[in-house]
Amino acid sequence: MNSASTATTTTTTNVPSDAPAHCPGTQSEDAGKASACAGCPNQQLCSTGPKGPDPAIALVKEKLADVRNKLLVLSGKGGVGKSTVTALLSRAMAHRNPEQNFGVLDIDICGPSQPRVLGVLGEQVHQSGSGWSPVYIEDNLSLMSIGFLLGSPDDAIIWRGPKKNGMIRQFLTEVDWGQLDYLLLDTPPGTSDEHLSATTFLKGTEGAWGAILVTTPQEVALLDVRKEISFCKKLAIPVAGVVENMSGFVCPKCTTESTIFPARTGGAEQMCTEMEVPYLGKLPLDPRLTKCCDEGKDFITEFPSSPAVKALDEIVTKVQQFFDQAKNQQ
């Protein structure tokens, strides 16, 4: 992307949604002072707020200097299995590449599910002079989540956007990941504060980065995922591809396949063709996977012959090819 289009994207993200036309942006020296600011509800806040780039961007760049690849797992729709796909991808990549190191960062602040899915619910993080130490799932797979900081799994996080953003900033600047080959970020549904914060911080880091999007076949999910693809394009987030989760049900006993969520408009594959993004593949439903997620077990080692595991292996290959190509283009 050329510098002109990058500048346009950055400016857009600094303009409040309720700002008037010709808003100079919150980071401009004219914020709150330009003629276009007259009558704006944000005028006083903009005129007194700090100007220039967030100093945390440089700190994140320094802290993640040893993280080679960053992968955002996104979905505009809740309930499509995004956290499950994140856990499956991280475990599959860690199994396939035992000589490499992998990390999962759960930035779904209000619904942190990775501690349960990855089998470390109830663990606590420890803090040292170098920062928080993530919780290790395997020798080469670690996890950080706000779930480790709660007094009880039933505690609710009732925070507005700025506090969520502060927590994400803290995760990216104070967790001692060490050297990682891949850091996977499990995000909440939508295109809101958490996504903007993560994107702003990751853009300034070394190495390759990108996103995969998770959907289910039915149109009600695809409508929201289309918005997520548009979000990625507007913010210049490289898209590794789309995973169609819960695509059919394969009975674990008789291996008969049934369609649970019919793709009446061609499903994710047709959507990818229309929106010009890569299609990574389908993951079928498997009731044994749900049981493993609830119990925190490794589905890949428990049921290696499952059709879902075979489909996952092909998706992992395509994701790694995306990052290999990104590395060659740098």
Image: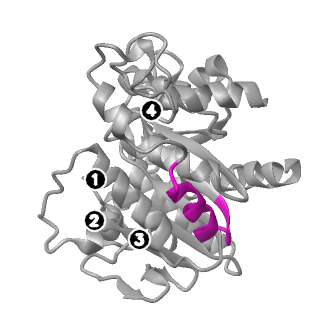
Label 3 vs 4, first from the N-terminus: 4
How far, Cα to Cα, is label 1 from label 2?
A: 29 Å
Q: Which segment is the magenta one?
A: 54-69
Q: Nearer the viewer, mark 3 or mark 4?
A: 4
Residue 252 in view (yes/no) = no
How far, Cα to Cα, is label 4 from label 2?
A: 44 Å
Q: Which quadrant, please, contains the N terminus? A: top right
What residue is shown with label 2?
Answer: 294
Label 1 vs 3, first from the N-terminus: 3
How far, Cα to Cα, is label 4 from label 1?
A: 18 Å
Label 4 vs 1, first from the N-terminus: 4
Q: Nearer the viewer, residue 330 or 288?
A: 330
Residue 149 left/right relative to 236: left
Image position, residue 302 (x, y; %): 45, 73
What residue is shown with label 4?
Answer: 26
Crowding around mark 1 (Cα neighbors within 10 Å: few <14, some 14 to 19, many 20+) is few
Label 4 vs 2, first from the N-terminus: 4
Say whether marks 3 and 4 touch (CB < 8 Å).
no
Image position, residue 114 (x, y; %): 36, 64
- Label 3: state its secondary structure: strand
Tell me the number on the disc at residue 144: 3
